[in-house]
Amino acid sequence: MLNVDLHCHSTVSDGVLAPAAVAKYAHKAGVNVWALTDHDEVGGVAAARVAAGELGMHFVSGVEISITWANHTVHIVGLQIDADNPGLVQGLADTRSGRDARGREMADQLARAGIPGAYEGALKFVDNPDLMSRTHFARYLVESGVCANIPEVFRKYLVEGKPGYVPHRWASLTQAVGWIRGAGGIPVIAHPGRYKLGMVGQGALFDEFKQLGGTAIEVVTGSHTPDQYHLYAEEARRYGFLASRGTDFHAPGESRVDFAALPPLPSSVKPVWHDWF
């Protein structure tokens, strides 16, 4: 039986374990086909590939690209990419620019809400200064006792309408799909159930994604609820998308579902890895 996880993060973006440590953690939980998909960065792919090979896991080069679509932030995963492709590497570098200024503005908002020192506090959790994110601020708010856990942070702060939320203009859907395809990869819409687009908006996203050459969506992911597994299996069939699976792992105990507990894809969908072996 294949145990496939195609969505994970390391210290190269906003995870807490180095790429090799993520590989070991996933392997210990039974994963045997694994992708590292750090946010807007491929700097951990080489180390992840080596670690996966030493553990006997099949490794898939990946990335998760932040885009702005209809004034919403959406994430597009690229699988089986050439991580050295110049177009992809430059596109990701352009996407990362501006994160520091955004982080300082987030900290200013939190300070006005009575939470000083958030920029410095978040920075303690940042391994790659180019990739400061909301997750780093969330960890600081937990560490400092403002919130009990990460889910509470994202109920009270750092989301639209709450202190600390600062939108960022990311890449476009056209750019992200183009970079991934140009690098020989497979574009995948990450955790579609997370986006507050409504049925019409989601349909428009799926239609445009397919027209641009997108081929898959995540169906079973740590960012979906169990009822959404079946909902997005139906959507995959309806649009003719392949189905992907991944925990969206960031840290032990931080995700809703860890490696060992993620269920398999429904049998009604065709896995994105159906022709890889």
Image (cartoon, rainbow, N blue to C red):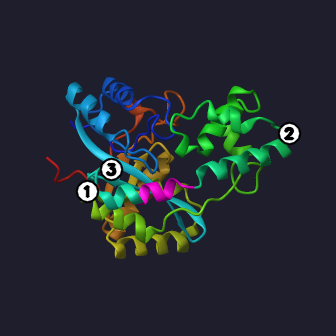
Establish if 209 lies above or below 19. below
Q: From the image, tell me which residue sits under label 3.
A: 266
Identify the residue at image location x=66%, y=39%: 137
Magenta stretch: give its range.
91-97
Q: Secondary structure at mark 1?
A: loop
Any part of residue 4 in sight = no
Vertical placement of 217 versus 121: above or below?
Answer: below
User: Where is residue 105 drawn, in percent x and y?
Assistant: 73, 51
Cα distance between the residues tagged 1 and 2: 50 Å
Three-letter code for the amino acid on which mark 1 is drawn: Lys
Check the picture and name the quadrant holding the N terminus: top left
**73 sits left or right of 239 in the view:** right
Magenta stretch: helix, strand or loop mostly? helix
Residue 124 lies in what quarter of the image?
A: top right
Look at 70% across and 47% down and name the residue there.
104
Could you tell me residue 61's position as x and y percent? 29, 46
Query: Which sits earlier in the primary sequence, circle 1 or circle 2?
Result: 2
Separation of marks 2 and 3 at Cα, in angstroms: 46 Å
Q: Is residue 161 left or right of residue 272?
A: right
Amino acid carrying label 2: it is: Gly
Rate crowding at label 2 as few (under 14), some (14 to 19) or many (20 or more) other CA atoms within 10 Å: few
Q: Kindly identify which numbered label has been placed on residue 270.
A: 1
Whether 9 is drawn above or below 260: the answer is: below
Q: Earlier in the sequence, mark 2 or mark 3?
A: 2
> From this viewpoint, is residue 23 visible?
yes
Q: Which residue is mark 2?
A: 114
98 or 24, which is in the foreground?
98
